[in-house]
Amino acid sequence: QVQLVESGGGLVQPGGSLRLSCAASGSIFSFYAMDWYRQAPGKQREWVTTITSGGITNYADSVKGRFTISRDNAKNTVYLQMNSLKPEDTAVYYCHLVAPGGSWGQGTQVTVSS
């Protein structure tokens, strides 16, 4: 099974930026789409964005224009560039491999607060 490891979370002020990374083990990474999800305290996990194996992207309305997903297949890594962060973006962010029996990372905390 593919192992996913997120990094890059932290504390940032409103209006700031962070870049999350998700590194995948194994050789199948490039064949599958990747998602980012997030889960705020007391709320259900919600979908944030997807990038297909061919690089086509889609975003939730709440992050469109502020977040950018990208991937580097040579490095088996997917990224989430988050700009103009808002307090409501505070959550644990998870990456997900869109494959049969797809894998999840352990999550990385993003806190947006002054």
Image (cartoon, rainbow, N blue to C red):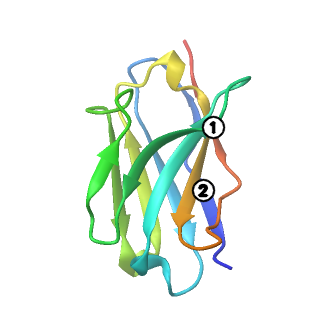
**What residue appears at the point 48 percent right and 55 percent down from the top-left corner?**
35
**What residue appears at the point 68 percent right and 26 percent down from the top-left corner?**
43
Residue position for label 2 = 6
Which SS class for mark 1? loop
**What residue appears at the point 51 percent right and 26 percent down from the top-left corner?**
89
Q: Is residue 60 left or right of residue 110?
A: left
Q: Where in the figure is residue 98, as x and y percent of width and height?
A: 51, 65
Q: Are marks 1 and 2 in contact (CB under 8 Å)?
A: no
Question: Circle 2: is it few (<14), some (14-19), or many (20+) Cα within 10 Å?
Answer: many
Q: Is residue 53 left or right of residue 10?
A: left
Question: Could you tell me the amino acid type at mark 1?
Answer: Arg
Q: Considering only vertical position in the picture, is 9 above or below 87?
A: below
Q: Quadrant of the N terminus?
A: bottom right
Residue position for label 1 = 45
Question: Could you tell me the amino acid type at mark 2?
Answer: Glu
Q: Where in the figure is residue 107, as x and y percent of width and height?
A: 67, 49
Residue 110 visible here: no
